[in-house]
Amino acid sequence: MPPDMLRYLLVSYGLAALIGGGAGLIGQGPGTLGFVVLGAVMMWTPAVGAWAAQRARGEALVEPLALRPVLNRWLLVAALAPLGLAVLTTAFQLLMPGVRFNPDPANILGRVAGALTPEQLAEVGAKLSELPVHPYLLSLVQAVGAGVTVNALFAFGEEVGWRGYMARALAGRGFWSVSLLTGVAWGLWHAPVILQGYNYPQHPILGVPLFAVFCVLLSPLHTLARERGGSVWHAAVLHGTFNAAAGIPLLVVEGGDDLTTGVVGLPGLMSLVVANGLIWIWRRAEGASAAQ
């Protein structure tokens, strides 16, 4: 392993363990404000790792890692692709044992009942009843708004490392190899918070390898956005919108658990397999056209 890559991983993983693991040590687990704040800080540790690695190479950050924004149609693709994945995940959930379709807005209240007071629940219920469209549809629109703004800013911290530094360091290995290696590193980097119940509250141990598989399957879409868009910001918008849309499939189902529902559960993995199949077919057809 090249010294600068080793430095990148040591800094990124070391800081993630210190911040993410430290949150649990001070009693700030998933669901607490402290965990949200420290999690947002942790998202910038790959950027620090990339800075350390680039400094070791004697190179700058911005130009070599394509950190300047580029406006093109791939920004729109990056913003909308997660919505398709959310809808596809919603459908795949209905194939899971014990998961039932329930579009009643009251179902949403049941999911947040433990986190709100009776007065807050009543207020949320009243607002849901006044919505002109179903919360599922409204959430799809809101996900784009959040994904291209505040979520993209935080996701950018991660993407400086994963689709900035690592994409450059692994250049020449091929699209799928780069996606695989980046996906493994990206997924295991989350281990300090996954072990605390983040994403998989019912299966924190199994969640570590499962989330690594999830990131491997999600990585090609990010690699494609970065490759075709020409900037790390495309991957950041995709990442941010995906995070914003992650809870949408849960709005219209009941039953199941963290393995049989949601974008990080089996339904999400199935939707990503479909997405990767489409990417493979498209790239293969594109290569065949270029060869003619």
Image (spheres, rainbow, N blue to C red):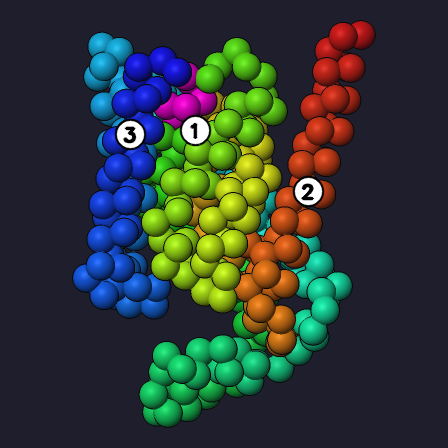
Viewer-closest of 105 and 183: 183
Closest to the observer: 63 or 246?
Answer: 246
Q: Which residue is mark 1?
A: 163
Quarter of image, res 70: top left
Check disc 2 and report its element: helix, strand or loop. helix
Picture residue at 31% right of the left edge, 14% below the top: 3
Residue ID for mark 2:
273
Assess whether residue 107 is covered by the magenta stretch. no
Can you tell which mark lies on residue 10? 3
**Position above or below: 67 against 275:** above
Secondary element at image label 3: helix
* Distance of label 2 from label 3 (alpha carbons): 31 Å
Relative to the observer, which residue lies in front, 190 or 222? 190
- Marks 1/3 in contact by CB < 8 Å: the verdict is no
Q: Main secondary structure of the magenta part?
A: helix
- Image quarter in which the C terminus is found: top right
Dot 1 alpha-carbon crowd within 10 angstroms: few under 14, some 14 to 19, many 20 or more: many
User: Quarter of the image holding residue 188?
Assistant: top left
Residue density around tag 2, few if under 14, some if 14–19, many if 20 or more, within 10 Å:
some
At label 1, which amino acid type do we have?
Arg
Q: Which residues are magenta?
A: 164-169
